[in-house]
């Protein structure tokens, strides 16, 4: 009797199960569902029974109950190696920056605005005249790569020496135009590893200053703008960020940069944005091992740091002497996201720009000894003329 009752009830239970097999499309193992459908059971796809929202309008409420401990101020005073403040022109501007620095725990900013000559001297003078900010902003000098050819290296080195004498503490940010679009005097593309540039890198080594270089953009910017592209929304919002066949490939640019770094082993290079390999730690680890004169900076890749907390924590611990904090775009309200990722074990919290990342972040909970190195000690080691802010021990 019980067996008969079970046989009568079982088919009804199957029909009642939401997302069952009825009304779907069957696919083979390894195949993807057709567009507009998703896999609801193994190899069975189904379309929603109501209109699907766009990627912009789907904003589900987070139902995860977990620690929620925003970190408005860095645990230790940080050196922002990748600062982009507006050009420093007045004491009032410095007063405002001081309030913002103090609120978020920023000790020193290295302005990486590629400024040189008289413009550099003018900004240095404004900073040095300020009674309380004179030791909290320093400048990198720019290099003009226009018309590289006969006599260029001598002029570039002379300007670099003058800028260092005027107060510059490094070179950069060397922009992504080097390799992508900059042309030599003869009209040909200026490759990142062109030997004509070596005298500048050698001069930086002689002057004991680091070279900060930004090469290429995320590799997805070279891929089709389709629904498999992780950066689809960004590229849809900013379609000019995609690189077509008229540009060198991402891989070619990366190889040129690496050859240049290897050919100048006495020069300290800081590679911006973790070389755009924060999503590929095995490759980035190989680069770190092969190029001991290379450091990396974390600006604008927090979305990759915070989505792989265990592997990233291991990477930071292993290479703790060669990672610098940097933010890139100066938006004070965004710095606390970095502090939270670096300092906590928080789970599943928002990133600050949806078009960069539609996923959540996780804290990597760095030990204090590592945190101090990333926040300020590594920067002070490679730029010993930068003053120590209060709390930097």
Image (tube, rainbow, N blue to C red):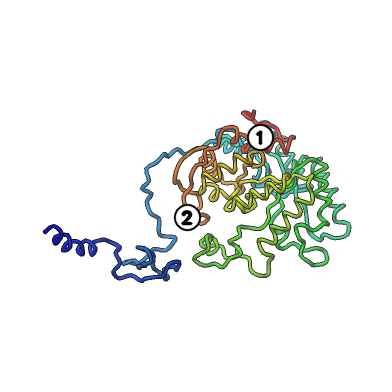
Q: CA distance from mark 1 to mark 2?
A: 33 Å
Where residue 142 sits in the image (x, y, percent)? 75, 50
Disc with the residue nearer the chain's start (1 vs 2): 2
Where residue 170 sits in the image (x, y, percent)? 74, 43
For the image, the number of numbered tags is 2
Q: Residues within 10 Å of mark 1 (few under 14, many from 20)?
A: many
Which residue is located at x 66 percent, y 58 percent? Answer: 216
Is 36 on the left or on the right of 386, as rendered?
A: left
Q: Secondary structure at mark 1?
A: helix
Between 115 and 185, the one nearer to me in the picture: 185
Which residue is located at x 47 percent, y 55 percent? Answer: 358
**Which mark identifies residue 358?**
2
For the N terminus, which image quadrant?
A: bottom left
For the C terminus, which image quadrant?
A: top right
Q: Quadrant of residue 137?
A: top right
Q: Secondary structure at mark 2?
A: loop
Between 6 and 84, the one nearer to me in the picture: 6
**Which mark identifies residue 377?**
1
Between 267 and 291, the one nearer to me in the picture: 291
Marks 1 and 2 in Cβ contact (< 8 Å) = no
Q: Is residue 24 above or below residue 335?
A: below
């Amino acid at each position: 009797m019980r067996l008969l009752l079970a046989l009568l009830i079982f088919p009804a239970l199957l029909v009642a199960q939401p997302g069952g097999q009825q009304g779907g499309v069957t696919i083979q193992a390894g195949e993807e569902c057709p567009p507009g459908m998703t896999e609801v059971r193994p190899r069975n796809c189904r379309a929603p029974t109501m209109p699907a929202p766009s990627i912009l309008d789907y904003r589900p409420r987070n139902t995860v109950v977990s620690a929620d401990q925003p970190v408005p101020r860095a645990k230790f005073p940080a050196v922002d190696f990748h600062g982009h403040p507006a050009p420093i022109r007045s004491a009032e501007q410095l007063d405002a920056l001081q309030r913002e620095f103090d609120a978020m725990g920023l000790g020193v900013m290295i302005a990486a605005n590629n400024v040189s000559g008289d413009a550099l001297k003018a900004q240095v003078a404004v900073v040095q005249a300020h009674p309380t900010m004179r030791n909290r902003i320093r400048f990198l000098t720019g290099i003009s790569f226009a018309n590289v050819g006969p006599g260029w290296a001598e002029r570039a080195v002379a300007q670099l020496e003058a800028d260092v004498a005027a107060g510059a503490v490094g070179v950069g940010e060397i922009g992504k135009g080097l390799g992508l679009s900059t042309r030599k005097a003869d009209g040909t593309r200026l490759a990142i590893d062109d030997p004509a540039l070596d005298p500048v890198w050698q001069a930086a080594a002689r002057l004991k200053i680091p070279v900060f270089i930004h090469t290429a953009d995320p590799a997805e910017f070279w891929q089709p703008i389709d629904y498999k592209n992780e950066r689809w929304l960004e590229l849809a919002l900013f379609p000019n960020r995609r690189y077509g066949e008229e540009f060198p490939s991402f891989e070619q640019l990366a190889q040129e940069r690496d050859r240049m770094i290897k050919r100048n082993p006495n020069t300290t290079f800081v590679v911006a944005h973790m070389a755009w390999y924060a999503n590929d730690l095995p490759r980035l680890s190989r680069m770190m091992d092969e190029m001991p004169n290379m450091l990396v900076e974390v600006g604008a890749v927090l979305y990759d740091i915070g989505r792989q907390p265990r592997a990233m924590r291991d990477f930071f611990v292993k290479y703790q002497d060669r990672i610098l904090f940097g933010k890139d775009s100066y938006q004070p309200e965004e710095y606390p996201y970095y502090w939270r990722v670096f300092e906590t074990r928080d789970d599943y919290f928002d990133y600050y720009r949806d078009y960069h990342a539609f996923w959540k972040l996780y804290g990597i909970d760095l030990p204090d000894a590592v945190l101090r190195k990333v926040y300020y000690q590594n920067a002070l080691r490679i730029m010993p003329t930068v003053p120590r802010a209060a709390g930097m021990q």
